[in-house]
Amino acid sequence: MTHTTNEPPTRRTSGAVVPVLAFAGIVVAVMQTLLVPVIKDLPQLLDTEPSNATWVLTSTLLSGAVATPIMGRLGDLYGKRRMLILSLAVMVVGALISAFTSDLLTMIAGRTLQGFAMGAIPLGIGLMRDMLPREKLGSAMALMSSSIGVGGGLALPLAALVAQHADWHALYYGAAGLGVLSITLTLLVVPESPMRAKGTFDVLGAVGLSAGLVLFLLPITKGSDWGWTSATTLGLFGASALVFFLWGVMELRKQAPLVDLRTTARPAVLFTNLASIMVGVSFYVVSLVLPQLLQLPKSTGYGLGQSMVVAGLLVAPLGLTMMFTAPVYARLSAKYGPKVTLILGMLIIGIGYGAGLGLMSAPWQSALIAVILGAGIGLAYSSLPALIVGAVPASETGAANGLNTLMRSIGTSVSSAVVGMVLANTAQNVGGVAIPTMHGFHVSFLIATAAVAVGLLMALFLPKPNRAPQLRISSEEEAGIARAEEVLRGFRGRVLDAEGAPVARAKVTLIDRRGRQAGAAVSGEDGSYVIAVPAQGAYVLAARAAGYGPLASAATHPGEERAVSVDLALPGDAVTA
């Protein structure tokens, strides 16, 4: 059967694909949030010192940071669905290991494996880009990107409920069960993407990136314990800078690097990633401050005296609001573009933290702050993958979104370290126990507000679509336009914009089922293109043009001496200066 549609043949499954992929993101968030209700009890539960117990959290953070860009690249090369299932499977194994132990080292090993689930977010976004019709892609990516906050917000009260009324190991059994359910649904509903990147996996690049990240994140997460000016902390930061420098030099020389630094250096990608760090900082501050403020006893004079479960419920609107902003984002982005929605999200986050400085005296005020911040963070998170996807080739979606997710993780890590230090240094001693002060909470909110201001500045620096780099057209592609009528067996059609107007000078690439380039052409002034096919079979036609979003469309050629008609409609409207 010949596919002559503009969209991939998988579009009939898109209704089920989106919630299943978003559920995978929620599972990842649940895994991350599991231990929040029992953080303060970990030393007693694991029979160890507080400084050792923090490794249970640090190990997940480090493995997640390492796994995210690596799994994204492996997905681009060998199949995003395959790597998504592998990420979740490793998480399930890690959860089961943690469920059966109270030994510190075994628990850390299990938590390290659970961190691999972080790769599910960029892989899910990559699958959506490859499969969904363009009119559904914006809201779908927004939901996937927000799922990390949605899952965290929903999991917090549930985890608190389990921790309060059952053995805390039950949290891990629950996470493993959710992971198995997510794997099953993915196998049943989500098809594999036909898109593949060229090249091989850069093992040395993966080792270098992993070493640099560990050397950077380790002193950030442990600096409070070791001392920020200690030889260990400063030595690790210096070693990280050296490793990243050598790694960057090596990556620039490789034909198929783990991270394409030239693409990453484009303003559209660079400023999005820098803004992502600040969004990560702002997201984590509220998650650290509000639950503590709500649970502190009223006898402190500022604590709100709520139980663990009630505190979780009052913070839950943070995640719920993020979920409800996904469809709102899609409408706003369609009209004004993802840059505007990112700026709007940043402004709302700033308003939320500004209001929070004066609204800390009643439980309902905490819920209100959670709603405002959830709306802002939801809009900001939803904008990030759309900005990345619009700036990189289709074959690099997984790796690019993996790097973007990593930037958010770095933001949350920095946030955790800085706020932890602020609260520790401003704490008051009551009966030998250090209790956070209102001054510490205020300073934490001010830090978040400053991060939002920096993020807003980065968002303002994002280039307008009309500043997108112009496509370079080779002499062979120019000749391809002239030879359009000579092709007897192939695909022909027109490249159009969202309104049906022709798009000239669009680059059209033919990709075979193994992900290799089988041909290329450039559309003429009337939008027409033609590409010869080497043999019958299934192909992907990828189209790109300056000022438009990219498109990947599946089509099949019967192998006869004729041209199969496939029109390609690029998402977005042309932007004029």
Image (tube, grey):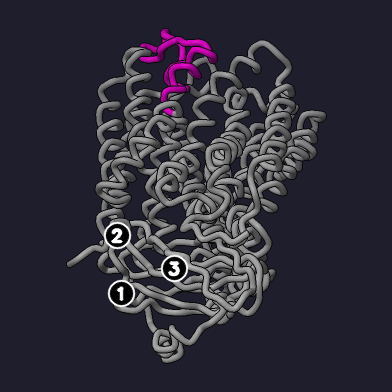
Tell me the SS state at disc 3. strand
**Which of 413/342 is in front?**
342
Identify the image quadrant of the C terminus: bottom left
Q: CA distance from mark 1 to mark 3?
A: 15 Å
Residue placed under numbered mark 2 in the picture: 462
* Relative depth, front residue between 210 and 510: 510
Instruction: Report which quarter residue 93 is drawn in.
Output: top right
Q: Is residue 410 left or right of residue 44?
A: left
For image coordinates 58% across by 69% down, the residue present is: 243
- Between tags 1 and 2, which lies in front? 1
Along the horizontal axis of the image, is 357 left or right of 159?
A: left
> Crowding at label 1, few (<14), some or many (≥20) Cα neighbours within 10 Å?
some
Res 302 → quadrant: top left
The answer, for residue 219, to whether it is visible in the render is no
- Name the residue tied to disc 3: 543
Q: CA distance from mark 1 to mark 2?
A: 31 Å
The residue that label 1 is drawn on is 526
Q: Residues within 10 Å of mark 3 (few under 14, many from 20)?
A: many
